[in-house]
Image (cartoon, rainbow, N blue to C red):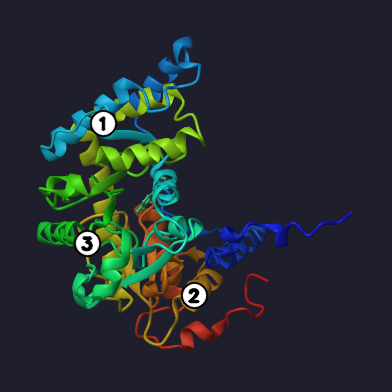
Amino acid sequence: MSVDWTSRRADRLSALPPYVFARLDELKARAREQGLDLIDLGMGNPDGPTPTPVVEAAIAALKDPSNHGYPPFEGTTSFRKAITDWYGRRYGVQLDPDGEALPLLGSKEGLTHLAMAYVNPGDVVLVPSPSYPAHFRGPAIAGGNIYPMPLRAEKDWLIDLSAIPEAVAQAAKVLYFNYPNNPTAATAPREFFEEIVAFARKYEILLVHDMAYAELAFDGYQPTSLLEIPGAKEIGVEFHTMSKTYNMAGWRVGFVVGNRHIIQGLRTLKTNLDYGIFAALQKAAETALQLPDVYLHEVQVRYRTRRDFLIQGFAELGWDVPKPNATMYLWVPCPPGVGSTDFALNVLQQTGVVVTPGNAFGTGGEGYVRVSLIADCDRLGEALRRLKQAGIRYDAGLEALTNVAVGSPGKLQ
Ligand SMILES: *Cc1c(COP(=O)(O)O)cnc(C)c1O
């Protein structure tokens, strides 16, 4: 018996845009099979270990049988309290741990399920282009009608709210945004947050801010949180993650804070889907939020050092890469006339260095690649040496890249 299960998938799956990562993954796998030494700067996966006090708290909690049963749906009281204490300490805003904070199985889960909880088929959802894929894939799964808000270098990668047609603003139900930004590494001034809150209040739009890079900021820059803005809590929620700041990507812990009614909708959906986070991991996450600031400084210095090292190296190859004051990425323009997929695939084939083509984040990312600062300076130096050796420069023109035509038998075949 052979049933075609692919054609029997629900429509919501076929509504998803194709994954540019798939071709890249294929090439990566082939390169690995051939024993090629890949330098993977493609993922947003932090390379350091989770801080020791967090691991130790997890081990102790693991040994405590009171953590072994189903956790409470809404998260443990002490983790929710640790979240609102942390939030008060960082941003000077008091939140109620009972209702204004909800632990999540990583923020990606929450960002996607929020769309399932609030978006009906056909509802208009405003999403920046480029953006973190969950911001458009969640609404796409829900059947939403996605209106892309292009981000541009000329506007410092800020959303241009004045470019949204009145009818679209009137119809919009949800708006996703994210600063410090993945993938562009841009940050937004406080005035921008005031503007977007005023916009969302005027049109009664549910404002979703993803603040995954809350603590990965440098040179004295302190990112703004949505809920610092007066009136934001009436229309918005903000997602946070333990993954990036605390090197806890594999633990799957994040949280959402903000409007209690919006959070309640997400919670209602989630009580039908999951039982929340293993209580021992909530204990560990709680410990992370209480770590002294010296730990944060270490993480910040690590990324800042890599940022400066790589920007300097790119400059020697003819690149003028802007210096971001937050995130763990560089947003690097492709050589003139070269598409982002072609460029990323060529760099991979010729050098074994993996970068992410900007169009994986939406058409607004075309013309750029995202480089993650997830390797130490030795490895970044090796990546630069290989680029140089392959003749890949910003100003080298197409010739350097057509040594190996995309899709044709190249070094990796
Ligand atoms: C990495 C990242 C996330 C994912 O966070 P998890 O909590 O690990 O699911 C969410 N948003 C942005 C913008 C990210 O870069």
Single out the mark in the foreground, 2 or 3.
Answer: 3
Q: Is mark 1 within 8 Å of ligand 1?
A: no
Q: Nearer the viewer, residue 317 or 9?
A: 9
In percent of width and height, residue 218 lies at 18, 52
User: In the picture shown, does residue 222 fall above or below 405?
Assistant: above
The residue depicted at 58 percent of the width and 59 percent of the height is 13
Single out the mark in the foreground, 3 or 1.
Answer: 3
The residue depicted at 43 percent of the width and 49 percent of the height is 45
User: In the picture shown, does residue 28 fall above or below 395?
Assistant: above
Amino acid at the residue labelled 1: Ile
Please indicate, yes or no, whether residue 376 appears anywhere in the rendered image: yes
Amino acid at the residue labelled 3: Tyr
Quadrant of residue 268 within the rendered picture: top left
Answer with mark 2 or mark 3, whichever residue precedes in sequence: 3
In percent of width and height, residue 194 lies at 12, 57
The residue at which mark 1 appears reads as 83
Amino acid at the residue labelled 2: Thr
Answer with mark 2 or mark 1, whichever residue precedes in sequence: 1
C-alpha distance separating marks 2 and 1: 40 Å
Answer with mark 3 or mark 1, whichever residue precedes in sequence: 1
C-alpha distance separating marks 2 and 3: 37 Å
The residue at which mark 3 appears reads as 203
In percent of width and height, residue 405 lies at 58, 83
Circle 1: element type: helix
Single out the mark in the foreground, 2 or 1.
Answer: 1
The residue at which mark 2 appears reads as 341
The residue depicted at 28 percent of the width and 73 percent of the height is 167
